[in-house]
Image: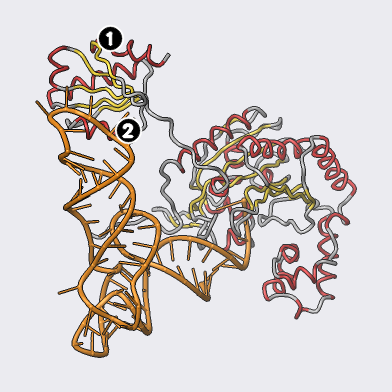
Amino acid sequence: MSRIQKIKGFSDLFPPESTVFTHMETVAREVFGAYGCREVRVPILERTELFARSIGEETDVVQKEMYTFADRKGRSLTLRPEATAGVLRAFIEDGGTEGVTKLFTCGPMFRYERPQKGRMRQFHQLDVEVLGASAPQADAEVILMLWTFLERLGIQSLTLELNSLGCPQCRPTFHQALRDFLDAVDAAALCEDCRRRTTTNPLRVLDCKVPGCREVTAAAPRIADHLCPECAAHFARVRAILDAAATPYTINHRLVRGLDYYQRTTFEVLSGDIGAQSAVAGGGRYDGLVAALGGPAVPGIGFACGMERLALLLPPLADQAMDFYLAVLDETALDTALILGQTLRRHGFRGETAFEAKSPKAHLRQANKLGVKTCLLLGGDEMARGVIVVKDMATGVQTTVAQDDLAQALGFRAA
RNA sequence: GUGGAUGUAGCUCAGUUGGUGGAGCUCCUGGUUGUGGCCCAGGCGGUCGCGCGUUCAAGUCGCGUCAUCCACCCCA
């Protein structure tokens, strides 16, 4: 029979990799919970329109990267390509109050792209959304939350980049300035994509990695110089708080995010050690998005953190070793072994019992491989006497104890 | 969607100018009547990704196809 293999760009995680993922989630709950985030669990499947309206019809994500299909009633559904839209939809549907709401979620996202290092078609994100706060303090806290989380994981050599995209009031001014600049540029100096972007989405020209384009745009107008007084003050305040918190960052005037809903503060955390897909986390402010999705007029800011990319930076994490392995030397002892295992676990020990009788040699090899502290041996002789052999794997010393006293014997051993 | 690289044992990989496929690790057994690691001996295990072609003969050469990886693009 031909074997069925996993879908391209999807992955199976076994230990130690899966253990690393669990660890990331545990630390995330701890850190984000300490800031008042409540964990929400939202669907992976949403109506396509939700993403089209929030992420932006013209974005690459919506235009060519979504897993979209019709259900049995012909409705267009999409596997979520990012978390924010679904979380906001849930927030609104739940009643969307106007106070401050801090939410955390995590899970799989889906984008139909060609896989490469740090990029899967099914990938996982940790996601924080703070709704109802427009103050720059909220921006700063969200960034600090993310930075604290990464520090807690022990990841070194990350860089934090910051920019402000302005607001609906001041961005048009900048857009115009940028357009004027690009119109004056010799089109031949730009790459094919950027010639198109000049008219469709001039902001993205700044983000182009082609050296020629970067040279041309080195002298381009900067968003920072075109912010309205409110946006400029907001951004200055965010930077001041990060300075006060001694969090290192750089301003990247070219930092433009690929999702349409961002305004004012945007940020990215980058690593030079994980290949071409260097963004470990990214986020920003999205005032107006909740209202655009039919909710109350509450502002919002959040970020997403890529777990696969984070995992590339974390050392493998071994599973916690078992306390015991119960070796069965004779078939007549199989049931008793299982019951003894149950008793030991009730006493807080972790371990496994053999499902079939084998030679002591075979069992001890297994016990050794599992790295257990203690190997218990139960055969015909022991069964007849109501005892069991307890062998310390490190010292090789073994004793015989009554089966009824086993848990107690191991307890003394553990102490 | 585009480009490059790679597909040989469960895993990591050798395989010469085309001539009946190997190593290390893993696993199993034995070296000890019921005692692990280290060592020694033996054993299990392969449609050489798949298909077509060239040839007396293809793991090796050609074409196609599928898969994986890396990069472009874009993003977490």
Q: Where is residue A332 in the image (x, y as percent from the top left)?
A: 12, 23
A407 above or below A326? above
Q: Mark 2 lies on which chain?
A: A
Q: Quadrant of the C terminus of chain A?
A: top left
Foreground mark, 2 or 1, reads: 2
Q: Is residue A240 left or right of residue A396?
A: right
The Cα atoms of the two marked residues, 2 and 1, are separated by: 24 Å
Q: Mark 1 lies on which chain?
A: A
Q: In which quarter of the image is the N terminus of chain A?
A: bottom left
The image quadrant of residue A255 is: bottom right
A313 above or below A132? below
Q: Which mark is residue A405?
A: 1
Q: Position of residue A400 (x, y in %)?
A: 24, 14
The image quadrant of residue A274 is: bottom right
Q: Which residue carries the number 2 mark? A: A368
* Residue in view at x 54 percent, y 60 percent: A65
B25 above or below A95? below
| Amino acid type at image mark 2 | Asn
Q: Where is residue A412 in the image (x, y as percent from the top left)?
A: 38, 11
Decide which of tag 2 and tag 1 comes sooner along the chain.
2
| Amino acid type at image mark 1 | Asp
Q: Is residue B20 left or right of residue A281?
A: left
* Residue in view at x 56 percent, y 53 percent: A49
Q: Which mark is residue A250?
A: none
Q: Where is residue B1 in the image (x, y as percent from the top left)?
A: 51, 72
Q: Do the residues labelled 2 and 1 touch (CB within 8 Å)?
A: no
Please rate how many residues cluster around mark 1, counting C-alpha atoms within 10 Å: few if below 14, some from 14 to 19, many from 20.
few
Q: In this view, does A303 lie to the left or right of A386?
A: right
